Amino acid sequence: MTRNVDPVSLHAAYDECQAITRREARNFYYAFVTLPKARRRSIYAAYAFSRLADDIADGDGPVATKAASLGDLRKALNAALAGAPEGAIMTALADSAATYDIPESLFNDIIDGVEMDLTKSRYATFDELREYCYRVASAVGLVSIQIFGYDDPQAKVHAVDLGLAMQLTNIMRDVGEDAANDRIYIPQNELARFGCTEEQLQAGVVDANFVALMQFQAGRAREYFSSSKALFPLLQPRSRGCAAGLHQLYSKLLNRIELRGYDVFSERVSLPAWEKLRLTFTLWATNLMARRS
């Protein structure tokens, strides 16, 4: 338990993180609810922290102001993990980090990732993009498996791959929205290779060149999804459903992008609530069998 925090305040801090997750997490929340209670509330704390960092970077105001706010977040993180948390998110996060031995470096990686959005809006190659995806997504995955529980260190490799697969899917889905905000995450050398321009992305043009570009992006994401399946048996049995749920949700999202002929401009690609609920019930059943075993 976090030092100098009474149980009632700690419970309230976790409740606030859950409320943030329920309100903001969309796809994630359906997978999170399949976890055992103690692990679930720590996942809520990790998500709320990531959401806070992301909201600072995406908020209004000058870059310098947002950079200063992220600097303040680093200081608050350091103080929280040293035993002096301030606010609900940091209180819950510090308790979770102590409970599940989560390295501070992973939380700093997440801040590093969103900080990149303040100064970098183009990526020359996939190697550059991969570094960004690692920080904003794979680092979250590494935090998550600390909470899920695992024994084999190979789990880290596959958690990184799952984070990359999910973030690459997000990038494909949000191509138009990001381009409208002058952010192009698809590597510049791959745009050139397939004969696509930034102006085309901003105009929402879906032609043969764009489809070929997106097929290439989808193929890369599929490779990471395939590799990340090896993560599930390495996790504690009652945590496997959550990781599998995230994998399935984002794989299905990628399927929908493909089924729409890669038209990600006319409307936002998403999964219907009934499909998310059906998957949640399936995962609950899987976890129940694991518990009985």
Image (spheres, helix red, strand yellow):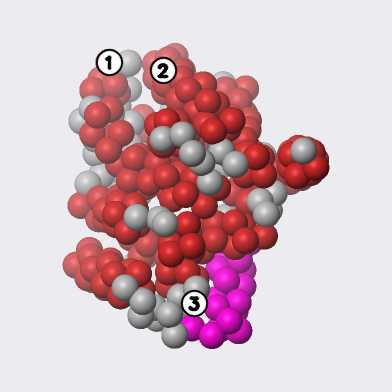
Q: Nearer the viewer, residue 250 or 11?
A: 11
Q: Which SS class for mark 3?
A: helix
Q: Picture coordinates of residue 46 (x, y %)?
A: 48, 59
Q: Which residues are magenta?
A: 5-22
- Looking at the image, tell me whether mark 3 or mark 1 is earlier in sequence order: 3
Q: Picture coordinates of residue 21 (x, y %)?
A: 58, 61
Q: Which residue is mark 3?
A: 88
Q: Picture coordinates of residue 93 (x, y %)?
A: 45, 67
**What quarter of the picture does the C terminus occupy?**
top right
- Looking at the image, tell me whether mark 1 or mark 2 is earlier in sequence order: 1
The amino acid at mark 1 is: Arg
Q: Picture coordinates of residue 270 (x, y %)?
A: 62, 40
Q: Which residue is mark 2?
A: 216
Residue, x 75% and y 44% (percent of image)?
Answer: 291
Residue, x 35% and y 39% (percent of image)?
Answer: 133
Tell me if residue 6 comes above or below residue 117 in the rendering.
below
Q: Which residue is mark 1?
A: 193
The amino acid at mark 3 is: Ala
- Marks 2 and 3, Cα distance to the nearest angstrom? 42 Å
